[in-house]
Amino acid sequence: MSTLVGEGLTKTYGSGHTAVTAVADFDIALEAGEVVVLLGPSGSGKTTLISLLAGLLRPTAGTVRLNGEVFRADDPRAPTLRLRHVGFAFQTFNLLPTLSVLDNVALPLRLGGERRKPARRTAAQWLDAVGLDNRSTNYPRHLSGGEQQRVSLARALVGQPDIVLADEPTASLDTRTGAEITDLLTELTRQNHQACLIVTHDSRLADAADRLIHMNDGRQADPVASG
Ligand SMILES: Nc1ncnc2c1ncn2[C@@H]1O[C@H](COP(=O)(O)OP(=O)(O)O)[C@@H](O)[C@H]1O
Ligand SMILES: [Mg+2]
């Protein structure tokens, strides 16, 4: 059984002559321990697809299955399921500026109802795993972009989700730092037997993939045809 499956996913924004179909009849299945890189140019529908898979956006058509069960964005249990099963990393890191590095990482556990002390203890272990154990009392503004992305990886992984979804995780970083972040993300998710989906416009990330998918105009594309 695949960890996360999208079947016939379609998303149309707006209606009438202004309608834009961002994702069109897209099938995708993510397996535990596997890194999938989805490569597509800007505007090809990557963020929309990841939002559909995460249950953050309701598809116009199609179904998402999480560990075999239908996962609907409008299900009242969706936020809890997402918190428990899905970790996120973003291009802009999305750290909370008013929380320390340690508390940013602990946040998913705190939202899941864990007490402060054990949540912080687990968070400290993940900060260690991303090489930032010495930064726990700093605030995000004290960190470089690469460090902030490491914190955001620790936060994505702290709850040991089944799936990690990364939207352009290297797009704000220089080449070398981006490569380090990609290595760290893929090593940790493989070690922890998680399904990992990285969506990006950067073809340099292709090497990180166990499986590469190309996307163009909302559809799976032939890599030759899409260049
Ligand atoms: N909230 C929205 N409302 C209307 N159109 C949108 C919205 N979000 C994205 N789009 C359009 O959908 C298409 C795909 O966008 P997006 O999923 O952000 O692609 P990517 O992440 O690959 O750049 C683009 O044409 C974009 O303009
Ligand atoms: Mg995007």
Image (cartoon, rainbow, N blue to C red):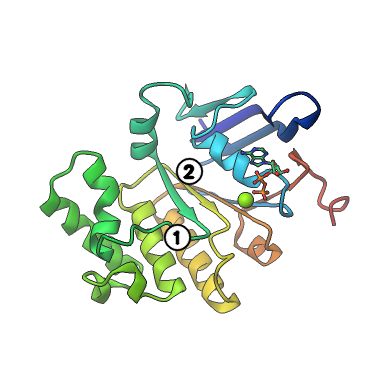
Q: How many other residues sit within 10 Å of disc 2, few (<14), some (14-19) or many (≥20)?
A: some
Q: In which quarter of the image is ligand 1?
A: top right
Instruction: In the displayed orientation, state which residue is furthest to the right.
Output: 225
Q: Where is residue 98 in the image (x, y as percent from the top left)?
A: 27, 60
- How far apart in space, not on screen, are marks 1 and 2 (Cα)? 24 Å
- Label 2: which secondary element: loop
Q: Quadrant of residue 13?
A: top right
Find residue 32 and name its label. Answer: 2
Left-right relation of 204 to 5: right
Q: Which residue is drawn at 59% across and 36% down?
A: 29
Left-right relation of 141 to 29: left
Find residue 137 and name its label. Answer: none
Q: Where is residue 53 in the image (x, y as percent from the top left)?
A: 54, 36
Q: Position of residue 31 (x, y in %)?
A: 53, 41
In this rendering, the answer to whether 61 lies above or below 204 is above
Q: Residue at x 36, y 64 (%)?
A: 151
Q: What residue type is labelled 2?
A: Ala
- Label 1: which secondary element: loop
What residue is disc 1 on? 93
Q: Where is residue 33 in the image (x, y as percent from the top left)?
A: 48, 48
Q: Which amino acid does label 1 sit on?
A: Phe
Q: How many other residues sit within 10 Å of disc 1, few (<14), some (14-19) or many (≥20)?
A: many
Q: Which of marks 1 and 2 is nearer the N terminus?
A: 2
In this rendering, the answer to whether 144 lies above or below 60 is below
